[in-house]
Amino acid sequence: MTINAPAMVLLAMYVVVAEENGVRRNQIKGTIQNDILKEYIARGTHIFPPKESMRLITDIFEYCSKEIPLWNTISISGYHIREAGSTATQEVAFTLSNALAYVQAAINKGLDIDSFAPRLSFFFNCHNDFFEEISKFRAARKLWHDLITKRFNPSNPKSAMLRFHTQVAGVSLTAQQPLNNVARVTIQALAAVCGGTQSLHTNSYDEALGLPTEESATVALRTQQIIAEESGVASVVDPLGGSYLVEHLTDQIYENAKMKILEIEALGGALQAIENGFQQREIHEAAWSHMTQVEAGERLIVGVNHGVLEEEEMPDLLKPDPELWKKQSAKLDNLKANRDNKKVGICLDKIESASKSDENLFPLVIDAVKNNCTLGEIINAMKKEFGTYIAPSGF
């Protein structure tokens, strides 16, 4: 579930739907992104200030460790950091730095490392530089293991495992000659598998033009299936381990990412560095460097500044039904008209009150969902105490 600022509410809705269908909380399996720090760094869909956002995340860690033990409580994301323009090394460093901040916040809340760390998961990007990307995944896995083992000494080996999902690089796909993106997606997906990903998303070739059509989504799916079933690479653990180039690049990314993490910690840690705009400025500079290389012809992008066609034939694009939002709006109006609005008010008041204390908010949010409170209403109840956050100008 790719949701961040309101992640607690969406997970609560999932829990309630599961229980309405006879599935107990301790049986539920899945993953919620729930990674707010990268929103401040790269994506901007945050709602609350950083401190309050971190409180919601650790509340989820605490509740799920007891009540929803099979749920992956966070998917710590480098994907959006890379989409914003970071380098491979920055993607590893900023992602793991954020992850360390989550771990420390949970420990500060009184949680034992082994009660939540085995359910941490990660989410990385995969670009076109085949060997660099494979090495990036290998370096991230080793660096996370070393950092967690040295700093927190967990008893459960799973607490130091870096389990990750990969999505190929949307930002690398071009609107020009979109069928060329099939080749890009294939290279990136193959690199992710060779790098050891546990889960994979392949983008559709019309990514740069709009939402996928059934045809383009099927091609993306078939790309994964051909890699999985025909190429043989999925049958081998670490297929490029021992390669001089890959081992060299792995060591290089490991050391450079570690140095960057230590630099962030010298600034007070990931949260303090974000509030000072450190990661944001670094990404902006990397993105600017990439853009100037493309514009100068130093970096070739087929269809953009190399192999350009004067006239192109565009594929058919998906056109969503414009009436859908009206239908959803009518359903929401009907819900509000037929629910017990007295109970709704009581639930929202409890959330607002608990937001002023250290009480875990998750049980109250689940109760609010059961009584048909909406996502917006629950978030607004928190806003009354937490406020909202606007990043300082300049980064």
Image (spheres, rainbow, N blue to C red):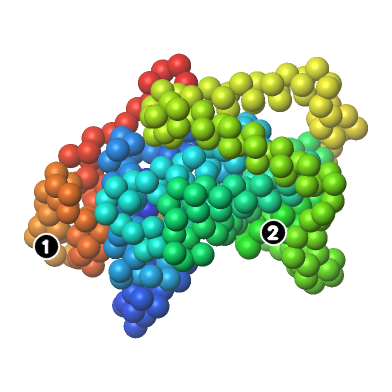
**Residue at the spot x=34%, y=79% of the render?**
24
- The quarter of the picture where residue 267 lies is top left
- For mark 2, give the secondary structure: loop
**Residue 14, x across and y down, in percent:** 37, 66
Q: Is residue 307 left or right of residue 273?
A: right
Provide the residue designation for mark 1.
Answer: 343
Q: Nearer the viewer, mark 1 or mark 2?
A: 2
Q: Is residue 78 left or right of residue 352?
A: right
Residue at the disc numbered 2 = 196
**Residue positioned 34% across, 64% down in the render:** 64
Q: Nearer the viewer, residue 263 or 77?
A: 263
Q: Is residue 38 visible?
A: yes
Secondary structure type for disc 1: helix
x, y percentage for residue 241?
A: 79, 56
107 sits left or right of 281 in the view: left
State left or right for residue 291 relative to residue 229.
Answer: left
